[in-house]
Amino acid sequence: MPPTWFLFLRIALAILGLLWFHIHFWIVCSSSVKNVMGNFDRDCIESVDCFTKVGIKGTYLNIIKAIYDKPTANIILSGEKLKAFPLKSGTRQGCPLSLLLFNIVLDVLATAIRQTKEIKGIQIGREEVKLSLYADDMILYIENPKDSTQKLLERITKFSKVAEYKINIQKSVTFLYTNNEILEKEYKNTIPFKIAPRKIRYLGIHLTKEVRDLHAENSKP
């Protein structure tokens, strides 16, 4: 997302009094793209629907299916290669398709969030914006956080059961925008994510709750 677009969204959030939170997805214990595919369910990766919906079909789809047709791995112990065993989850180690496959599978969740009317995003012109995706990170822009968050967690839970994809609640942080102290207290008790008072770190950049602090937080030596 370009910096100007991000600032525009931040200003809109400040005006509308919305909940803005950054959810950090991960597989097993890592947030890196290198290991993020480690536990994705094989059936989810091989689902034809995932690929055809993004325009991958024919020869290209057959190549991907061939690469992941009954993959196996070996362990070398003391110079001896042990018996091969089947890989039932994740991608092949070092596979250049890992990030692409991850994005394709994650798009299933993103589409579900966008299509769920109970999850309220912010209105930018004629478009309702609910999320931004980059690598294994997702930022959501949500109005009516009490109801929207509950429905969001339902969608994530359902997706997790299919794709073996989990969310780390402890690493998920929120910015809460509201001038109503009663509502703020209620949201803090119902939202299962940590509420950041000033800033969060996203893709190596400090995103601040107040726009005026953005430059100062990111220009420190």
Image: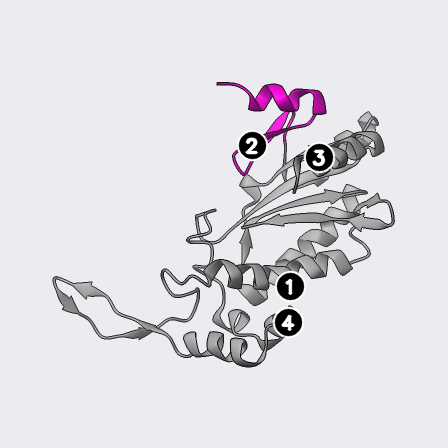
Q: Amino acid at mark 4?
A: Gly
Q: CA distance from mark 1 to mark 3?
A: 28 Å
Q: Position of residue 221 (x, y in %)?
A: 48, 18
Q: Earlier in the sequence, mark 2 or mark 3?
A: 3
Q: Earlier in the sequence, mark 4 or mark 2?
A: 4
Q: Which residue is mark 2?
A: 205
User: Sequence order check: which comes first, mark 1 or mark 2?
Assistant: 1
Q: Which residue is mark 3?
A: 4
Secondary structure of the residue carrying tag 2 is strand
Residues shaded magenta:
196-221
Cα separation between marks 4 and 2: 33 Å
Q: Nearer the viewer, mark 4 or mark 1?
A: 4
Q: Is residue 200 left or right of residue 116?
A: left
Can residue 189 be seen from the camera position used here? no
Residue drawn where x is 59% and y is 31% of the image: 200
Q: What residue is pinned by disc 4?
A: 55
